[in-house]
Amino acid sequence: MSKTTKIAIPEWQGCVSTVFDFANRLLLIDIDGNEEINRAEIALPDEPMLQRVTSLKNLGVDVLICGAISRPLSFMITGLGIEVLPYISGRIDEVLNAYLTGRLTEQRFSMPGCWPGARKGFGRGHRGRRRCRRRW
Amino acid sequence: MLNRVRSKERDVILDSITEGVFTVDSNWRITSFNRAAEEITGIPRAKVLGQKCSDILRADVCETKCALRETMGTGKPIISKAVHIVDARGERHAIAISTAVLKDKSGKVIGGVETFRDMSLVEQLRKEISHSYSFEDILSRNHQMQNLFAVLSNIAESNTTVLIVGESGTGKELFARAIHNISSRKDKPFIAVNCGALPDTLLESELFGYKAGAFTDAKKDKPGRFALAEGGTIFLDEIGDISTALQVRLLRVLQEKVYEPLGSVSSVKADVRIITATNKDLDKLVEADKFREDLYYRINVVKLAIPPLRDRKEDIPLLIDHFIGRFNHLHNKNINGVTDQVLATLLEHDYRGNVRELENIIEHCFVLCQGEIIERKHLPASFQTTADTGYPDIKKAVTLEEMERIFITHALRQNNGNRTAAAKQLGIHKSTLFRKLKSLNIEL
């Protein structure tokens, strides 16, 4: 029996919300295999970061597909074992379809101006504040 | 021709100012973006032009209360509205935005202009002064710390007594403040008391206050810290250092929620959440009869154990980054980062003083560093000594082969296993290094 995966996507006007930290609505999509079996939409209150993380955990989210996200929030969510796919933009259905077919890494779903590697997660060869990011 | 010259002139003027400026057309697509805007958002101009402004500015108002939309709708400018953005590096910034409409010669609205100032320094100073730290200020990717974060929301809501244990400098007070700041008591005072810093008699009057005439020189009533923290949270640091007499009084506050100020004949009700912390092993103090068992169980309802920095070294690059950003604001400098050598040195260090020690090391570097990158020579003297005798095993080596092994292993460690960089540091070709790795049987 295949395991159901719960995907969360912050939504705004049919598209992925620009910043997860400030998003107001969250789509919850249950996926079984490659099939969408359930979809729900909930309101995200204007709440402190920690509560937002706790909400995701309580909702049983496995994967968060989002636009920009602040580093502390990303760390907290990944620390709970939730996979974060950040810096994604586009219409919800196209993004979801791309996720299910393994095409989410295509450039057209990438938000403008994120540094190389940002979509693989924070902190890879990243230190210092500005410019001059030397690799190690 | 004239238009092109004017456009260039306009770009030079816009690039010379310290405020971020961008303009949009009527479809919210960015048509110009100045240098300061690039710096504040961290996104280069080339990637911005033609994009939707909300995808670039990434502000909390973009989706619901867009200032530019409001201005273009009403025609009225908005001045210095405080908002938060998430920049390209994933950092939150406070900025102040102002908006105005752009009109053509006939007066028709053709777009809008938004200017914004980075308020991070003001925000940083406000935090330094008011200590209004939250969990956003505790950076960690360590799984133990993430487990703590996961339960903190529930702990904050529960109003229960919390015991925070951890070595000195791990951030116990930061955790306590963060718990307070997300609890329902956040609008009431947070009072921190270092129990180890005051003699016992003084600590008692500090905590519970006194009445006029309670002792010589007690000319008028003085409220204690419990009274000052009424409705809020009191943080008792170094709880393992208080005397057994004071432990009894504290136990009464915890059990009955009342206390008596010195010299008072009546009890005062206390509506205060108590968070305690210690770097001592309270179990051992209880066994040695130096800490009351009943008090221990009262304060140990929820225990948070903060791991020392040496057990979460994956956080060191993050923390270095964080402190550099903070000190850049506070010291008005523009330091970009540390060299690979400094990072390797800091990763190897033992950090008996934990995060506070790392913070002090970076602050020391800020005093000495006049350039943009912190180098090894900027580190405190104790690190320079280590550098001179950087090969502790060298005295044990008796053969040339053993010395080679030590040098190569050390160079690899300093360069995080990067063989090309290690070969460069050793002054040999990388193929020579590969050959020596094989002949000396050094595993990576």
Image (cartoon, coloured by chain):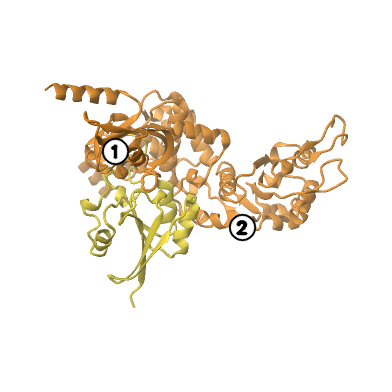
Chain colours: A yellow, B orange
- In the image, what residue occupies the spot 47% across and 63% down? A58
The residue at which mark 1 appears reads as: B43
Q: Is residue B270 left or right of residue B304?
A: right
Residue B393, visible in the rendered structure? no
Residue sitting farthest toward the left: B1
Residue at 46% across, 40% down: B349
Q: In the image, is residue B114 above or below residue A94?
A: above
How far across and down, in percent of the image, does residue B440 sit? 29, 48
- Dot 1: few (<14), some (14–19), or many (≥20) neighbours within 10 Å? many
Residue B297 found in image quarter: bottom right
Towards the viewer: B389 or A34: A34
Amino acid of disc 1: Ile
Packing grade of label 2 (10 A; few <14, some 14-19, many >=20) is few
Chain containing mark 1: B
* Label 1 and label 2 in one chain: yes
Q: Amino acid at mark 2?
A: Ser
Q: Earlier in the sequence, mark 1 or mark 2?
A: 1
